[in-house]
Amino acid sequence: MFDVRVNSFENHLLIILQGKFELAEANQASEKIIKAIKSLVPGFTVITDIRELAPATEDVRQVFLNTMQAMKNSGMGLEVRVVNQQNLVTANQFQRTSRAAGYSAQEVNSVPEAQRLIDQLVTA
């Protein structure tokens, strides 16, 4: 399951990824994310909630990598990733993937914590 929400006023994207992704669903999520970032301006911020996401297969991880590269190439200013300390395999997989895309995400344990961190870092 995935949900992608755009807040144009705050130039912000919220991505929620849950469950076990098959390749078709990963491609659908990627298309929606790429469409969403086209409605934002460079410097946009992203919160990616992967607390309930199962580790990805290599094919699905490649889709996530391509999506992360698209976000970076579109001028993403900052990504904060919401992780589950009981699911560090997924968190580590995503951090390695984002590093391969050329950036590292800040990690927190809740969406409100992610929003506070973005507010602190963007207004600093």
Image (cartoon, helix red, strand yellow):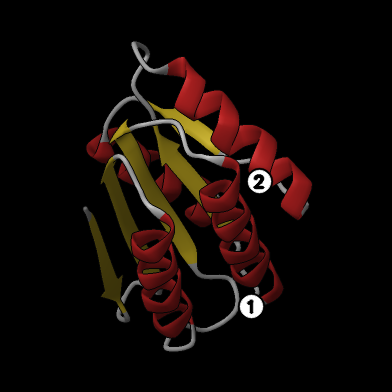
Image side of residue 47 versus residue 18, left or right:
right
Residue at coordinates 43% horizontally, 48% vertically from top-left? 118
In this rendering, the answer to whether 61 lies above or below 55 is below
In this rendering, the answer to whether 50 lies above or below 123 is above
Residue 26: quarter of image: bottom left
> Can you identify the residue that label 1 sits on?
74
Report the Cα–Cα distance between label 2 and label 1.
15 Å
Residue at coordinates 56% horizontally, 37% vertically from top-left? 94
Image side of residue 109 versus residue 55, left or right:
left
Q: Secondary structure at mark 1?
A: loop
Residue 31: quarter of image: bottom left
> Can you identify the residue that label 2 sits on?
98
Residue 38: x %, y % from top left: 49, 87
Q: Amino acid at mark 1?
A: Ser
Q: Nearer the viewer, mark 2 or mark 1?
A: 2
Q: Amino acid at mark 2?
A: Ser
State the residue lying farthest toward the bottom.
Answer: 39
In this rendering, the answer to whether 38 lies above or below 52 is below
Task: Report crowding for label 2: few under 14, some 14 to 19, many 20 or more residues within 10 A (C-alpha).
Answer: many
Residue 63: x %, y % from top left: 56, 60
Task: Report crowding for label 1: few under 14, some 14 to 19, many 20 or more residues within 10 A (C-alpha).
Answer: some
